[in-house]
Amino acid sequence: MDAVWSDHVARALADCVRSGQHSIALNMAEVDYISSAGIRILVLYSRQIKTIQGRVTVINASVNVKKVLEMAGLQALLHAETARAAAAAKAAEAPARKVSVEQAGATVDVFDLQADGTLRVSWPGNPKAWLEGRTDPATCSLVEFPVNVMGLGLGAFSSGDTSDGERFGEFLAAAGTAVCQPADGSNKPDYMLLQGALTPTIKVAYGMLGRGSFARLLRFDKGPQQPSLPLSAIAKACLDAVQSDAAGVVMVAETAALVGASLQKTPSDAATASEPGNIFAFPGIREWLSFTAETAFANSICLITGFVASKARGAQLSLLKPLVASGELCGHFHAAAFPYRPLRKGRVELNETVQPLFENEHVLGTLHLLNDWREASGAGESRLLRGACWCSPLVI
């Protein structure tokens, strides 16, 4: 395992991690030589996978490999010691129950978080004027997003004053973080994190918020029989898990593909609408709204916030639209995509999962997730590989 073969091993390990394998054993029975380049790869992936409570072990180490690892102080990579640590960690993990999904082979494990956890929903701002193509600053609301508030909508980061210059765009917020992509054509998302006394604050033109705590954690995986899972299937599983007809959802997931739209101009700037007062008229809509003609952000990891409800309940909740072609499920979701990084398995904490996305990586982009149901050329709906969902019933 010299410099040349270490590159091959590194690519193989990367493929394993992307496929969801977080417990990896390297059989080195026939490896008679390992250099510092090989040791570097073992240490690099061991550290990376350890952060998500996985492990890399060396099994059947040849005499030479075992001697080198021991001399380098890396006995912990050898099978016996790591196996004992893994068994102890697995025994300490709380049990989960199952929720069924229609996709064969897919799994959804549910962990109970807080029995009485709920999210109180509210709608700051007023979409009417904005969706008619008129700016109405008087209807904006200044909203802080501490760890117990999640939401989405149209807004701009604000320091609390009412000065001009806000760059409005679609935003999402969860776990003391907020992302907003200004609709100025730059396609460059900005973000704020809860740090000390600094709380993410957004001037909200209109939006939907959930304030409270999460009742359930869902861990989903596509399984070997499916290439990916549709967002609607995960959203439906969240409703089933909280046993409610409406739920707020925060998700961190490995992404197969996202489908949606992003603002190029704020609705109030959409003066090119074909019909006065109708900013959604064609072809004017193309001047301010960009749709994903093809799926986007494949092989990334994404933060998704949103709301899902049954058809009957969705009709009572502002800003929710049909999530599936049949109309039986309604929702509204925004997503921020990040460079791929593996996601720890089992029970995980929301803050500890979301915050590192921003601290260690940059935001690739944001999308208002929409389905493309055109029969011949439609991109379909957003699809995910595996991930974690925190959800709670909605109360008004």
Image (tube, rainbow, N blue to C red):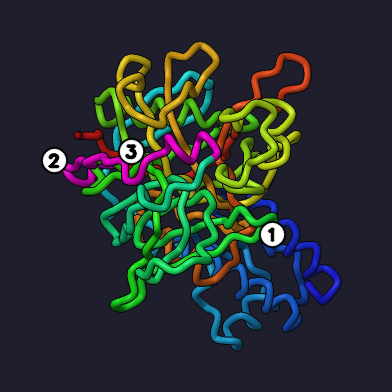
Q: Find numbered disc 2 in the image and state the secondary structure of the residue it sits on.
A: loop
Distance from disc 2 to disc 1, alpha carbons, whole Å, reads 43 Å
Identify the amino acid type marked 1. Answer: Ser
Residue to which mark 1 is pinned: 186
Quadrant of the rendered image containing residue 110:
top left
| Image x and y of residue 178, in percent | 43, 59
In the picture as drawn, the residue positioned furthest to the top comes out as: 326
Quadrant of the rendered image containing residue 53:
bottom left
Identify the amino acid type marked 3. Answer: Gly
Of residues 246 and 153, which is closer to you in this image? 153
Pick whichever of labels 2 and 3 is earlier in the sequence.
Answer: 2
In the picture as drawn, the residue positioned furthest to the right comes out as: 4
In the image, what residue occupies the spot 58% across and 59% down? 341
In the picture as drawn, the residue positioned furthest to the front comes out as: 276
Of residues 205 and 303, which is closer to you in this image? 205
Disc sitting over residue 248 in the figure: 3
Of residues 137 and 204, which is closer to you in this image? 137
In the image, what residue occupies the spot 63% across and 51% down? 300
Of residues 20 and 331, which is closer to you in this image? 331
Residue to which mark 2 is pinned: 116
